[in-house]
Amino acid sequence: MASAPGGTNKMVGLILVVVLASAAGFSYVLMTNTENPIDSGDGPTSPILDIDDAIRIDGDGEFQNYTVEYSVPGNGTIDNPYVIQNLSIVEEGICIDIRNVEAPFIIRDCELKATAYYWGMAIYLRNCHSATIERCRTEGGISGIEFLGCSEVVVQDCFVSTTCAGINSSISQRTTIRGNTVFNTTYGISVVCSNRTTIESNRMFYNELGLWSQFSYNCTLTRCNVTDNKLGVHIDVGCQSWVIHSSGFARNMDGNAKDDGSMNQWDDGVSIGNIWDDYSGIGWYSIPGTAASSDRFPRGS
């Protein structure tokens, strides 16, 4: 463990989000719940306190040593994963940095703030598998929660704000992003070169882009509230076989959605589409973009 992760290796995992940051040029707005529109507020306002040291773990051996030194629960198995919990960290660089770990682990109930906007991160996972991040609050940095080259990662019930990429999945497989609130970011949720990503029951508001994806296949977006962003959802080039339904889109300044991928489906294929605040009530709802996609079962808000 180190109190301040350093060195040039950290830049490798940041390349994709730096590209995202350089592409940004939007402004911020505010979201409300789509099913029952009420002011959702901006979330917690209490400060994140600088109490605990930053964590850097590289490899299963270092993780095991860390658990012994700090009496971390669990034994690193599927039935009894390691649990890092109840930490409050303010760090210029990366608050929790875990790499090259095969053992299952959980990061739970932590409050994390990265103070370096252009390179800091609250949580960074690289080449990890069977990891869960839950009920964490993150602020600041270039990414709130980022995972690169990972699989079987679950991010759930977290509150992510005031960063460039709120929750960023890059070159990862079979990940789940569920029940999170993401606001006041450039890219609320970004999915880059990450296949079989499940995105469900998230609230994305006050972002320049609620969700953005490139070069990602066989992903799903369901039961999400995407409202009052600059642009709601952009399924960009190289995306294919996305399925998007049961979500609400409203008051996104430059449009609710855009599809520049191919063969993406904006309904469940049977009877359920999405809620659109600008739906005329007649026929299919056309999704702007080169894919020429449509929601065949749209509803108005």
Image: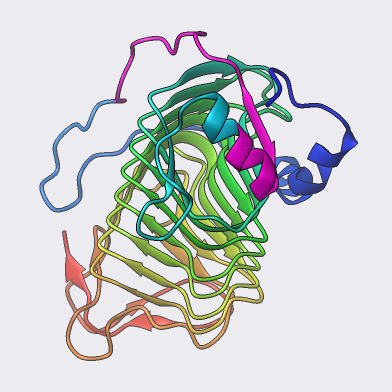
Q: Residue at x 29, y 50 (%)?
A: 179
Q: Quadrant of residue 64?
A: top right
Seen in the picture, residue 138 relative to 143 is either above or below; the reply is: above
Q: Where is residue 16 drawn, in percent x and y? A: 74, 51
Q: Is residue 212 visible?
A: yes
Q: How is the image coloured?
A: rainbow
Task: Based on the picture, tell me whether residue 57 belongs to the magenta stretch.
Answer: yes
Decide if residue 212 is on the left or right side of residue 243: right
Identify which residue is drawn at 23% across, 84% down: 283
Q: Residue furthest front?
A: 68
Question: Is 89 left or right of 42, judged from the image as shown?
Answer: right
- The residue drawn where x is 35% and y is 59% is 79
Q: Which residues are magenta?
A: 42-65
| Quarter that holds the C terminus | bottom left
Q: Position of residue 205 (x, y in %)?
A: 37, 40
Residue 252 image position (x, y, % from top left): 38, 48
Residue 51 included in the magenta stretch of the image? yes
Query: Which sits in the foreground, 216 or 30?
Result: 216
Which residue reaches farthest left? 36
Task: Determine which quarter of the picture holds residue 275.
Answer: bottom left
Q: Where residue 128 appears, x then y in whole percent?
A: 61, 55
Asked whether 36 or 96 is in front, the reply is 96
One can see residue 163 in this view: no
Identified at 49% across, 66% down, the residue is: 258
Q: Quadrant of the N terminus?
A: top right
State left or right for residue 34 relative to residue 211: left
